[in-house]
Each structure stands twice: as structure tokens, then as C-alpha cells.
Amino acid sequence: MWFAILPKLLFLATFNTGQACDPTKVKQYPFFGFPHWWKYITKGEYDGLGHCIPKVNMPGGLWSVGLAVIDMLLYLAGIVAVISIIIAGISYITAAGSSDQITAARKRIVNSLLGLAIVLVATAAISFIGNAIG
């Protein structure tokens, strides 16, 4: 039994722990497309299993983590804006000629498009600042 485990332990022992790496270059699959919290952290080190883990230096690294969290919230706001546009489009289609419902649906579409534009500009600004810091 331990004969099967010994080669795996020797394989794990060959990784160099403590070496520097860049966690942004590691292929990770985000959850529903949300960015990772370490998106703007470019310093990391390998753990015992050979995975690159981000290394946050306090207190300066908190800015990078904070910007990534804001980026996540902006991503969520973009999803909400698109869903709002879809709902407004459906209410526009089902208005059945009622001018009040058509006007309300148009307002909602315009407001949702403005919100989406604001989210896109804010995301570009946060990405620029995050890449400049990281």
C-alpha cells in the first residue's frame, strides 16, 4: 500500500515552494465569468502542491484586492442591466398598445442602457487603475 503512495510523495517533494510566480498568468476558470479576487495581484509563490497562490502584502495589497472586488460588483451590475433590458423589452412587446406601459418600458430601456454604459466606462477605468497598480 505505501509503495503506491511513495512515488506521489516524491513527486510532490520536487516542487520548489517559495519560488515567485505570477497568479494572473495561471489558467484558472472563473465562476460564471466573474473575475478572481487576485486579478490585479502579480506576485505569488508556489505552495507544496505546485499551485501558484497569490501573495498579498499588507496594507498595499489591499488596494489590488479592493479593485478586484469592485470589478466583480461592476460585472454583476452589468448582468443586472442586461436582464433589465430584456425585461423591459418583454414588457414593451406585451404592452398591447397601452401608451402608459409603452412609455414606462421605453424609460426602463433607456435607463438600463445608460446604466450599462456607466458600468462599461467604470469597468474600463477600474481595469486601467488596477493594471497600473499591479
Image: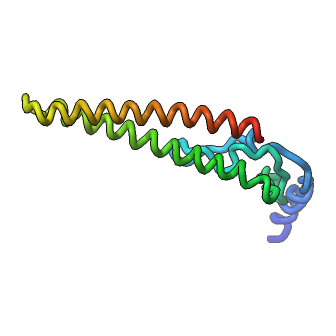
Examine the rendered structure and indicate whether residue 59 appears above or below residue 94.
Answer: below
- State the residue lying farthest toward the left: 97
| Image coloring type | rainbow
User: For the image shown, how many numbered marks are present on the structure?
Assistant: 0
Quadrant location of the N terminus in the rendered image: bottom right
Q: Is residue 125 left or right of residue 106?
A: right
Point 7% across, 28% down: residue: 97
Answer with left or right where residue 111 lies relative to residue 32: left
Front-most of residues 87 and 16: 87
Residue 101 occupies quadrant: top left
Q: What residue occupies the far bottom of the structure in this picture?
A: 1
Seen at 81% across and 43% down, the residue is: 22
**Could you tell me residue 3's position as x and y percent?**
85, 66
Image coordinates of residue 26 in percent, x first then y, are 74, 42
The one of 99 and 92 positioned closer to us in this rendering: 99
Q: Nearer the viewer, residue 26 or 107?
A: 107
In this picture, residue 95 sits left or right of residue 110: left
- In the image, residue 49 sits, relative to residue 111, either above or below, namely below
Quadrant where the C terminus sits is: top right
Q: Residue at x 56, y 47 (%)?
A: 72
Q: Nearer the viewer, residue 83 or 26?
A: 83
Q: What residue is drawn where x is 89% and y is 48%?
A: 20
